Image (tube, helix red, strand yellow):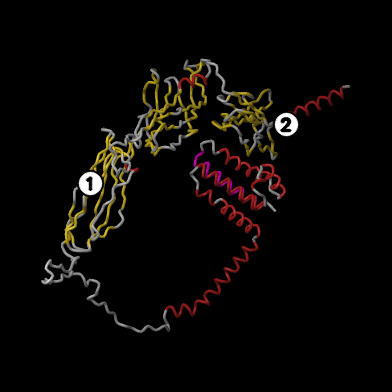
C-alpha cells in the first residue's frame, strides 16, 4: 500500500512538471463587440520567450498603436512564472464582422500559432461620461483645430490654414502621429516650416489652454464655388490625471491614446468680376509693380544686350504668365530665360518673376522697343489695374546699313549714295599665320613599337592568373549559387530601391517586385497569388519554414504600411529583409 502511494506521488510530480513546461501562446482582445468609434486592444501572450514574432494583417482595422512589448517574470513558492506580451491598439475602418488572424512565433525551435478571434463592429455608440475615465478626460482636454484666414476668398487669392493642437493645463502630451494628411486637390498649396514652434498660452471656447502650431499651409484656390478642405487627423498619446496619488501626494497620471481630427472646412471661392476685365489678363491677383529694362541702350551691330521684363510684389507670382516683348524684325531675339525669386510665407507668395531676352541688332540705326502693358486684379480695390512700361530706344552706332540706296521722287535724276561698309566685315578671314615646322616621325624603337612587341609576352602570365581564378570561381558551386541569388534579388528590387523615402510608392514597388519574383520562380499567374498557394509551393520546392514565414511577413508589411506612419529606417529594413529573403529562396528552392 505504501509502495502504491510513492508511485502516485511520482506520477503527480511528473504531470505537474509537464503542465508547467507546456508552452502557451494565445491572443486576447479587450472586447469582441464594439462601436466603430471605439478602440480595440489585442494582446498576444506567451509563457516562454520566443523569436520571430509575426502579427496578423489586421484586415478591417487601422493600427494606431503598437506593438508594445511587456515582460513579467516572478517567483512564487519556488515556481517561476514568465509572461511576455505584444499589444496592439486598433481602430475599426467600417462596420461588419472581422477576424483577428493568426499570429506566429518560434519558441525552442517550434512554430506556435494563435487561434483566430471574431470581432463584431457596430455603429457608433454613446460613450458613458465617466469623469474618472481617462479616455473621457482626454476627449475633453485635447482638441485639434483648423483656423482658416479667409473663408470667402477670390479665385487665386491666398488663404492660410493653421492647425493648432489645444491641450488643457492639467493634461500632457507625450507624442503624436499623423494618421491622415489632407489633400488639397482644388488648390495650389505650399507648407510653411513650423520647426522650432513653442507651446503658447491661449483660450479655447472661453477656457485657458496651451496650444502648439503643428502645420501651416498656404492655399491658392484654383476653382470657384464651394471647396472642401480635408481634415488633419492625429493619434495623440495623452497623459491624464487620475484619482491616485504617490507617496509625496502628487497626482498620478494615466497614459491613453486619443484620435483627434480638425474636421472638414468649407470655403466659398468667388469668381473674378467680368466687368472691366482686360483682354490680355492672364490671372495675376495681388499687388504688383511692373517694369521693362535693358542692360544697355547704345551698342554696335552684332553686339548683344539683355532686355528684362519683371513683375515684383505680393500675390500668385507662380501662377500667371508675363507679357511678351514685340521687337522690330531687324533685331534678332532669342527665347527668354525665366527666373523666379519667390518666397512663400504665411501671408502668401512675395518676390519677383522675370523673363530676360537676349537681343542682337544686325544693322546700324535707332530701334524703339515699344511700350508693353501688364494687367492684374487688385484685391485692395477689388478692381483691375493696368501697368505700362516706357518706350526704350536702342541706338546702334556702328554696323551695316539696311537700305543701300534710296530712290528720289524724280525718276530722271538718280542720286548715287556711297556704300558704307562695316569695319568688321572681313573678320572671318584670318590675317595671322600659325606655321609649325614639318618633321618626320619614325616608328622604329618608339614607345609604341616596344609596347606592341613586348605586350603579348607580358600578357601571358596575366592570362594564366585570370584563367586560374576563373576555374577556382567555377568550381565554387555554392558561392556561384549565392552570387546568382544576390544578383536576382537586386534585379527584382531595383524599382523599389529607387522609391526609398516615399512610403506609398516604395511599398507598391516592393509588393510588385515580390509578385514578379514569385511568378517567375514558381511559374504561377497573378490570380494564383494567395497566401496558402504561395506557402504550399514554397514548401514543395524545399524552402524552410523560417524563410517562408519571412517572405509572407514582407507581403503583410507592404499592406500594413499603407495605413500606418513608416520611418525611412523601417523602409530600409524592409528592403534589406526582402533582398535577403529572395536570395535565400533562390538558394533553397529546387
Residue where numbered disc 1 is placed: 291
Question: Does the segment drawn in magenta span residue 574?
Answer: yes
From the viewer's side, name the closer residue of 114 and 529.
529
Q: Which residue lies furthest to the right in this view?
A: 1
Q: Can residue 85 be seen in this view?
A: yes
Expressed as whole percent of the image width and height from the top left, the position of residue 103 reads 65, 35
Q: Is the magenta stretch mostly helix, strand or loop?
A: helix
Question: In the figure, 281 relative to 13: above or below?
Answer: below
Q: Residue 135: x percent and y percent?
A: 52, 21
* Residue at 63% across, 35% down: 56
- Residue 193 visible in the current orientation: no
Q: Between marks 2 and 1, how big is the CA–CA gap?
A: 86 Å
First along the sequence among labels 2 and 1: 2
For the residue pair 238 and 412, the one nearer the viewer reads as: 412
Q: Which segment did they paint magenta?
A: 566-581
Q: Is mark 2 on a helix, strand or loop?
A: loop
Q: Quadrant of residue 126?
A: top right
Give yes or no for residue 325 being in the magenta stretch.
no
Q: Residues within 10 Å of mark 2 (few under 14, many from 20)?
A: few
**How many residues crowd mark 1 within 10 Å: few (<14), some (14–19), many (20+)?**
some
- Dividing the picture into quadrants, the one containing residue 107 is top right
**Quick one: 299 or 256, which is closer to the camera?**
299
Q: Which disc, if any, is residue 22? A: 2
Q: From the image, which quarter does the N terminus lie in?
A: top right
* C-beta proximity under 8 Å, tags 2 and 1: no
Position of 562 relative to 1 (above/below): below
Amino acid at each position: 500500500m505504501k509502495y502504491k502511494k510513492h508511485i502516485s506521488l511520482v506520477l503527480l510530480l511528473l504531470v505537474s512538471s509537464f503542465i508547467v513546461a507546456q508552452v502557451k501562446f494565445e491572443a486576447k482582445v479587450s472586447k469582441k463587440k464594439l462601436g466603430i468609434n471605439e478602440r480595440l486592444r489585442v494582446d498576444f501572450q506567451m509563457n516562454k520567450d520566443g523569436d520571430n514574432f509575426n502579427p496578423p494583417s489586421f484586415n478591417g482595422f487601422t493600427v494606431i498603436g503598437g506593438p508594445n512589448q511587456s515582460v513579467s517574470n516572478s517567483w512564487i513558492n519556488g515556481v517561476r512564472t514568465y509572461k511576455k506580451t505584444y499589444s496592439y491598439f486598433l481602430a475599426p475602418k467600417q462596420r461588419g464582422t472581422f477576424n483577428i488572424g493568426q499570429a506566429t512565433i518560434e519558441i525552442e525551435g517550434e512554430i506556435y500559432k494563435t487561434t483566430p478571434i471574431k470581432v463584431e463592429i457596430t455603429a457608433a455608440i454613446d460613450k458613458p461620461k465617466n469623469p474618472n475615465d481617462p479616455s473621457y478626460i482626454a476627449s475633453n482636454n485635447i482638441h485639434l483645430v483648423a483656423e482658416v484666414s479667409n473663408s470667402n476668398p477670390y479665385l487665386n487669392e491666398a488663404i492660410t490654414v493653421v492647425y493648432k493642437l489645444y491641450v488643457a493645463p492639467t493634461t500632457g502630451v507625450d507624442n503624436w502621429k499623423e494618421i491622415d494628411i489632407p489633400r488639397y486637390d482644388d488648390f495650389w498649396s505650399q507648407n510653411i516650416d513650423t520647426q522650432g514652434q513653442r507651446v503658447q498660452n491661449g483660450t479655447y471656447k472661453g477656457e485657458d489652454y496651451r496650444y502648439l502650431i503643428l502645420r501651416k499651409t498656404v492655399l491658392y484656390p484654383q476653382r470657384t464655388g464651394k471647396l472642401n478642405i480635408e481634415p488633419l487627423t492625429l493619434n495623440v498619446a495623452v497623459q491624464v490625471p487620475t484619482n491616485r496619488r504617490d507617496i509625496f501626494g502628487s497626482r498620478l497620471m494615466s497614459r491613453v491614446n486619443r484620435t483627434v481630427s480638425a474636421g472638414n472646412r468649407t470655403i466659398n471661392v468667388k469668381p473674378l468680376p467680368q466687368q472691366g476685365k482686360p483682354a490680355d489678363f492672364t490671372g495675376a491677383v495681388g499687388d504688383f509693380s511692373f517694369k521693362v529694362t535693358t542692360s544697355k541702350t547704345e551698342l554696335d551691330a552684332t553686339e548683344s544686350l539683355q532686355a528684362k521684363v519683371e513683375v515684383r510684389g505680393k500675390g500668385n507670382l507662380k501662377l500667371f504668365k508675363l507679357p511678351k516683348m514685340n521687337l522690330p524684325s531687324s533685331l534678332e531675339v532669342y527665347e527668354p530665360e525665366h527666373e523666379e525669386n519667390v518666397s512663400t510665407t504665411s501671408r502668401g507668395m512675395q518676390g519677383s518673376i522675370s523673363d530676360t531676352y537676349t537681343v542682337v541688332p544686325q544693322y546700324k540705326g535707332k530701334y524703339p522697343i515699344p511700350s508693353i502693358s501688364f494687367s492684374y486684379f487688385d484685391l485692395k480695390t477689388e478692381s483691375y489695374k493696368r501697368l505700362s512700361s516706357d518706350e526704350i530706344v536702342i541706338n546702334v552706332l556702328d554696323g551695316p546699313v539696311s537700305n543701300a540706296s534710296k530712290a528720289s521722287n524724280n525718276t530722271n535724276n538718280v542720286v548715287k549714295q556711297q556704300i558704307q561698309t562695316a569695319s568688321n566685315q572681313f573678320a572671318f578671314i584670318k590675317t595671322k599665320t600659325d606655321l609649325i615646322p614639318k618633321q618626320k616621325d619614325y616608328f622604329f624603337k618608339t614607345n609604341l613599337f616596344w609596347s606592341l612587341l613586348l605586350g603579348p609576352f607580358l600578357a601571358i602570365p596575366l592570362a594564366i592568373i585570370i584563367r586560374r581564378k576563373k576555374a577556382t570561381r567555377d568550381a565554387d558551386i555554392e558561392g556561384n549559387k549565392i552570387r546568382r541569388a544576390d544578383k536576382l534579388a537586386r534585379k527584382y528590387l531595383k524599382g523599389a530601391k529607387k522609391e526609398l523615402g516615399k512610403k506609398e510608392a516604395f511599398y507598391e514597388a516592393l509588393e510588385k517586385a515580390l509578385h514578379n519574383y514569385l511568378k517567375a520562380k514558381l511559374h504561377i499567374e497573378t490570380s494564383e497569388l494567395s497566401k496558402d498557394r504561395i506557402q504550399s509551393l514554397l514548401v514543395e520546392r524545399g524552402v524552410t519554414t523560417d524563410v517562408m514565414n519571412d517572405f509572407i511577413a514582407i507581403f503583410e508589411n507592404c499592406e500594413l504600411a499603407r495605413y500606418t506612419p513608416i520611418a525611412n529606417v523601417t523602409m530600409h529594413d524592409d528592403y534589406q529583409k526582402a533582398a535577403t529573403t529572395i536570395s535565400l529562396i533562390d538558394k533553397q528552392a529546387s
